[in-house]
């Protein structure tokens, strides 16, 4: 027991001596340890947070740029012109079955080319299935049209129809002598159902798209002036002379 | 001379060495402290001064401004939709008119087109003339067009007959459209 007590005293004395010898080192050592801990627990996480915030800021700045561009674009957009463009485009590619629009187009092409339109027959087709002919992605109304003209006249009629109703496709042509028949598909497409996102970047129309709008608007302005009566009549007089309606060139 | 007489003892040298070490250690600790303190303050200031909140506020303000122009945005979106679809239809539809014009452009003036038929992918044409030379020239031109393969291909002459009543030759041809 006595030996154990002496041993303990000796060890305590040793520790005391060591403490006295190194006590001046304790404070700097403690500071260094604390500094290391601060670096590990505070500085590095803060720095990582800074990098994350930088990245977030970059993303938010990009979003803000998009929004500002959208705002500037929409502020400078002429609403009268865009409404008119939309009306023209909606006539060119209606959202539903536009029989009156189809008859207008046929009437206008007939008037401009001097081709007399005879009997015609609409076929709406299946309302649930896709197209069996033409472009399958778009629903269409099919019309079989009898025309009284020679081959050249019928070809001109089709060219004119492609101008007045650009969303149409002539799938069959049959001519012989002074008459012929053509099958035309008039496409339509529903308006998109998705919600317009204010923060999504606005896709600017290309020069080609703008040209298409201008051309369609020009054709619509002239074709709207000629209306085929929607009530059938027995008279089948000559069409309006082509010369009075001017000429237009088609990119199609 | 007695070598034990030494005013600078070994113990003093060791003590000085110890003091220098301690001094260096203190200096290192102070430098560490200053550096860590400066880094902490710098990062705090950097984090604090990042204009994230102001950017978000500006975004909110711009979105509210855009919402006032929502009708314009909807109209423009519908315009782009119509333009895209019309362009698709125009590019995908079968437009045989240029080919027909090319073929009709090759018909000599003394020939007449009696009939023309176009079904998806094929064209039939019936022409007549009083001259076999003109018909021959037309066939040569068609063969030339067919060789190029841009306007027509796979030309088949279905018949060449003489219409005695009208005193003219009638040519019926069929070709595939590329």
Image (cartoon, grey):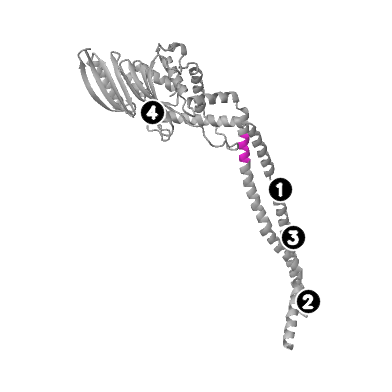
- Let me know if marks 3 and 1 both belong to one chain: yes
The relative height of residue B12 versus residue B76 in the rendered view (above or below) is: below
Q: Is residue A164 left or right of residue B68?
A: left
Label 1 packing within 10 angstroms: few (<14), some (14-19), many (20+): few
Residue ranking furthest to the bottom? A2
Q: Do the residues under discs 1 and 2 have CB atoms within 8 angstroms? A: no
Chain for numbered disc 2: B
Residue B146 in percent (x, y) is at: 29, 26
Report helix, strand or loop for mark 4: loop
Residue at which label 3 appears: B30
Marks 4, 2: nearer the viewer? 4
Q: Do the residues under discs 4 and 1 have CB atoms within 8 angstroms? A: no
Report helix, strand or loop for mark 3: helix
- Of residue A31 and residue B108, the one placed in the foreground of this image is B108
- Let me know if marks 4 and 1 both belong to one chain: yes
Where, quadrant-wise, is the N terminus of chain A in this rendering?
A: bottom right
Label 3 packing within 10 angstroms: few (<14), some (14-19), many (20+): some
Marks 3, 4: nearer the viewer? 4
Q: Which mark is residue B6?
A: 2
First-in-chain label (4 vs 2)? 2
Marks 3, 1: nearer the viewer? 1
Dominant secondary structure (helix, strand or loop) of the stretch shown in magenta: helix
How far apart, in angstroms, are the residues tagged by discs 4 and 2? 115 Å
- Of residue A242 and residue B154, the one placed in the foreground of this image is A242
- Let me know if marks 2 and 3 both belong to one chain: yes
The relative height of residue A29 versus residue B6 in the rendered view (above or below) is: above
First-in-chain label (4 vs 1)? 1
Residue at which label 1 appears: B48
Q: Which span is picked out in magenta?
A: A61-69
Residue at which label 4 appears: B94
How far apart, in angstroms, are the residues tagged by discs 2 and 3? 37 Å
Residue A116 in percent (x, y) is at: 38, 15
């Amino acid at each position: 027991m006595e030996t154990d007590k002496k041993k303990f005293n000796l060890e305590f004395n040793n520790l005391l001596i060591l403490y006295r010898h190194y006590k001046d080192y304790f404070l700097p050592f403690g500071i260094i340890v604390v500094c290391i801990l601060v670096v590990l627990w505070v500085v590095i996480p803060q720095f990582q947070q800074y990098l994350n915030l930088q990245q977030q800021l970059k993303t938010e700045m990009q979003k803000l740029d998009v929004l500002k561009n959208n705002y500037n674009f929409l502020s400078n957009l002429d609403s009268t012109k865009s409404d008119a463009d939309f009306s023209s485009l909606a006539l060119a590619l209606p959202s539903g079955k536009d029989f009156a629009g189809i008859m207008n187009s046929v009437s206008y092409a007939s008037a401009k080319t001097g081709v007399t339109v005879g009997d015609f027959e609409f076929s709406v087709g299946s309302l649930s299935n896709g197209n069996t002919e033409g472009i399958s992605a778009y629903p269409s109304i099919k019309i079989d049209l009898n025309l009284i003209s020679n081959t050249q006249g019928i070809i001109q009629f089709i060219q004119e129809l492609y101008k007045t109703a650009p969303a149409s496709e002539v799938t069959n042509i049959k001519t012989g002598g002074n008459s012929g028949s053509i099958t035309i598909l008039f496409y339509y497409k529903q308006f998109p159902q998705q919600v317009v996102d204010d923060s999504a970047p606005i896709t600017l129309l290309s020069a080609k798209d703008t040209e298409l709008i201008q051309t369609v608007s020009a054709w619509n302005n002239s074709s709207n002036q000629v209306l085929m009566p929607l009530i059938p009549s027995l008279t089948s007089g000559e069409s309006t002379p082509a010369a009075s309606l001017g000429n237009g060139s088609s990119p199609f | 001379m007695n070598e034990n007489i030494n005013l600078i003892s070994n113990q003093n040298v060791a003590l000085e060495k110890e003091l220098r070490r301690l001094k260096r250690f203190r200096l290192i600790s102070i430098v560490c402290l200053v550096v860590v303190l400066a880094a902490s303050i710098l990062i705090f200031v950097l984090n604090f001064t990042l204009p994230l909140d102001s950017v978000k506020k500006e975004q909110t303000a711009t979105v509210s401004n855009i919402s006032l122009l929502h009708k314009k945005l909807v109209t423009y979106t519908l315009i782009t939709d119509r333009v895209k679809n019309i362009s698709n239809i125009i590019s995908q539809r079968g437009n045989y008119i240029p080919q027909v014009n090319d073929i009709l452009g090759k018909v000599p003036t003394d020939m007449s087109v009696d009939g023309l038929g176009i079904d998806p992918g094929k064209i039939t044409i019936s022409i007549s003339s009083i001259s076999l030379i003109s018909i021959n020239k037309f066939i040569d031109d068609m063969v030339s067009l067919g060789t190029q393969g841009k306007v027509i291909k796979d030309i088949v002459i279905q018949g060449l007959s003489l219409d005695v009543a009208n005193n003219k030759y009638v040519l019926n041809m069929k070709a595939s459209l590329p």
